[in-house]
Amino acid sequence: MLFVNGLELNECNVTHSCWTHPPLCQQKTPNDCVSVVKWKPKGEEGYEFEISSYINTLDPSKSYWIAVGISHNQRMDDDTVFECISSPDGHHRAQISFNDETHNQVLHQATSQLLHSNEISLIDGFFKCNVTYLPDNRLKVLQEDQFKIHQIESKPFYLLFAKGSADRYTFEKDIHFMNDGPDFPWITGEMVGFCRNCTDKSFAIIGENSIQTKVQRYWRYRIAVFHGSILIFCWWVLVSNAILIARFFKPLWPKRKLCGVAVWFQLHRLLNLVAFPLEILSVLLIFFQSGWVWYECSYECDLMALSKKMHAITGVTATVMALLNPLVALIRPAPDSDSRPIFNWIHWFFGMFAWIFASVTILLSVPLGKTGLYSNYGPTPFYIMAGYILFFIAINILLEMITSTSDRRVIRDDSDGVHRFIVSQSGMSLSVLNGPTTEHPSTRVTVCF
């Protein structure tokens, strides 16, 4: 028999199709082989699948699982999964499950109809599982679960391989191994066909183009942290201050201009001009690390999956509104135009609702796995973020109370083009400070160095 680093490979391309990890390691670096998936047709009995893997890198105090998925695409979603679980004390189980994005559902009734366990062993850190899959029994599966069992002979599919830890007693699976390297999940680069009655008896040997992830896990986590950190700074530091300056600080520096424009306006615009490109960059980077794929649960959503789905929706909504707001500002009417109040409210609406959607998006990031916030600190980050939002709201209320109770109003002396601020009631209300009296008709977009 041919053994490569303990893996039995003498049947490959003789009686079995094989997929080793890393790909073709048996030909290049045999000592690096850590796992193999083998399969062959068995006529009316269906297909025999054998999964073998070293599990030395997993938590020795837990049970272990190894699995092969049948997928329409190169992602872990909408996949039929054959998996085996074994505990250090000798208890084993083979079962069928279904991947729905981040959620995995064990199909107990389907397992009883479609999967027969031949051999499961765990010896000295080497996990071996041999099962027979009975595709002809698919119609015996509960009708509501039949779509979760792919008809593997209907067309080619991608294969996925993964392994991980599980609860020692309940066999509830943890997420797959997460570090970069040969133990991270593998995906075939080409589709694989299954056929029991084909005259061509050639067997598949999965080649070098198997992939793990388009972006290394090391960089995916760092991109995610950069994405979150930059967007928190943009929305909760730069944009928040831009909102406060435009809303409450127009009466300051009444006789001064910066590059020919009111100081408050230059500060408001500068903060937004710094924030906007950083927001776009951060959003593009997070799509890059995800392979330009929109992730969402399609059938069942747990808390993490729902947070991930809504995080993407609210985040894109905030970004779109942030993009539209400066475009609207480019076509703003003259300060003394009758349409200026309408523009002011539209500009305010896009700005405030973009901030609200961005804040909701930041809160929804807490349970996400890549942030590590909830897994490491529990709900504390959520409380801190919620505290900031309440603080910002309180500041707005306080400043509104101060300005509404002071006798401050705004007039413009056209003789010298200088804004003057005179005491009167509700002088800093939105309708006044965002109105024609706060800007000179000659105001234009100015770049000053």
Image: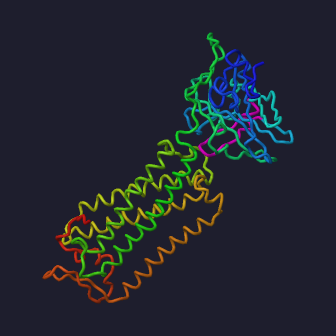
- Name the residue located 71 percent from the left edge and 16 percent from the top edge: 15
Q: Nearer the viewer, residue 418 or 217?
A: 217
- Name the residue located 76 percent from the left edge and 46 percent from the top edge: 59
Q: Nearer the viewer, residue 39 or 339?
A: 39
Quarter of the image holding residue 248? bottom left
**Position of the C terminus by quadrant:** bottom left
Magenta stretch? Answer: 94-114
- Name the residue located 70 percent from the left edge and 39 percent from the top edge: 163
Instruction: State whether residue 20 is above or below residue 109.
Output: above
**Position of the N terminus by quadrant:** top right
Residue 422 location, x and y as percent?
Answer: 26, 88
- Name the residue located 28 percent from the left edge and 81 percent from the top edge: 253
Quarter of the image holding residue 92? top right
Instruction: State whether residue 323 is above or below residue 443.
Output: above
Residue 156 location, x and y as percent?
Answer: 57, 24
Residue 25 location, x and y as percent?
Answer: 65, 27
Q: Nearer the viewer, residue 316 or 55?
A: 55
Verify whether residue 330 appears in magenta: no
Residue found farthest to the right: 89
**Left or right: where does residue 350 sit relative to residue 44?**
left
